[in-house]
Amino acid sequence: MDGVAGGLSRSHGICMTMGTAATMTAAAETLGLALPGSSSIPAADSAHALMAAACGRRIVEMVWQDLIPSRFLTAASFDNAIAVDMALGGSTNAVIHLIAMARRAGVALDLARFDAISRTVPVLADIRPSGRHLMEDFYYAGGLRGLLSRLREALDLTCPNVCGLTLGETLEGAAVFDDAVIRPLTDPVSAEGGTAVLFGSLAPDGCVIKKTACDPRFLHHQGKAVVFRDYADLEARLDDPALDVTADSVLVLQNCGPVGAPGMPEWGMLPIPQKLLREGVRDMVRISDARMSGTSYGTCVLHVAPEAHIGGPLALVRDGDTIRLDVEGRRLDLLADEAELAARRAAWTPRPAPYGRGYGAMYAAHVGQADTGCDFDFLQAGPPTPEPEIH
């Protein structure tokens, strides 16, 4: 056991899989905010020191050239970043982060754009949790520049970069050295992007699923809901032998969104009940208004919006309700009688606010839902702040 624990963290650095950190460094480089080739260097590789020195030199030059982030953050560069996220089988958290970044930059970006790009960009990076390899393998196979070189047709190559070149110019000489890790377009991991966006009666403002990390048999599934009203309820009852749950059930976790948790924790990969684990069950449909780690896997529907805490349809789900998941059709629906749902809504009462004053109260009043980036409304792009007058 000591050997296993010692091997989990082989060095300093981020997760060794395509988690949120690896996804977002790749997105930052694609957006033009990082030097080409810098995002996927393993933490212990000596190229890191060279990259750090190059960054130090370049940032001084950028100050003299008056190059600021708004020069790089355009609708086209965000489309490029989304395409890369999809080709990497990247973290579902990238959806929230990129929407928040875009809105702060004054760029209109919504969930529909993610799904439109996902439909046209294949997964080429064979990296866990969607594939077989690790981030170190990815770097030595050609890294992000190698991947970008294979995605040329899906990218706007005219987008500028902090190094003063266009994206297309930075890809000169880029190559892939291992087709097993960075697949050719003719042999993708998946014909579509790693993340799918769903809408429906249970998620009118949208939700997401990393479909490349799911058991394929659940991509179209209908089952009875087993509902947990919050994470404490989940912990208390999930492993109760008397819990009425089967492998075909749909686990539903409520009140774990931006306001309800508060803070939208990474609770979306709900554990499999112990009694099902003993039967050999390793995946089942799980739905929540929470997030999950980019290293997580399974049929987990996340970021359901609006969240349960503010009265989204997720709050109205009861044990035994039928839920239908159709990833190909991009639908998530609660199959319940409209009159019954109306009665439940009339009887629904908000849960007490987590905080009555201070920062927590300010947070709850101003944080957005998952489909708008979970960002403060007052930090989104607006009129410029005037320079203070000097008297």
Image (spheres, rainbow, N blue to C red):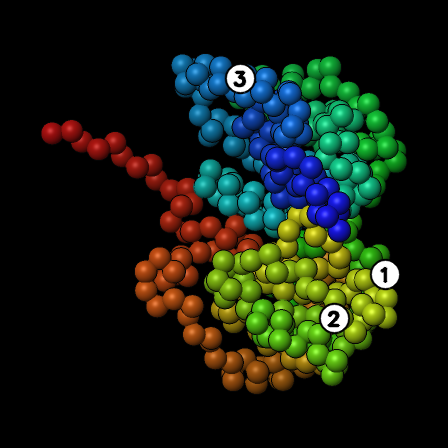
Which type of secondary structure does the marked residue at label 1 adopt? Answer: helix
Q: Residue at x 79, y 62 (%)?
A: 283
Residue bearing the label numbered 2: 273
Which type of secondary structure does the marked residue at label 3 adopt? Answer: helix
Amino acid type, callout 2: Pro
Residue bearing the label numbered 1: 217
Marks 2,3: beta carbons within 8 A: no
Q: Which residue is drawn at 51% across and 45% down?
A: 100
| Residue 260: image tag | none
Q: In the figure, 223 relative to 104: above or below? A: below
Mark 1 or 3: the one toward you:
3
Amino acid type, callout 1: Arg
Question: Considering only order in the chain, which callout, 1 or 2, is on the residue closer to the N terminus?
Answer: 1
- Quarter where residue 41 is shown: top right
Say which of 24 and 378 sits in front.
Answer: 24
Percent coordinates x, y for residue 210 in the rendering? 72, 52
How many residues crowd around disc 3 within 10 Å: few (fewer than 14), some, or many (20 or more)?
few
Say which of 169 and 181 sits in front.
Answer: 181
Percent coordinates x, y for residue 39 in the rendering? 62, 29
Percent coordinates x, y for residue 56 in the rendering? 49, 18
Residue bearing the label numbered 3: 53
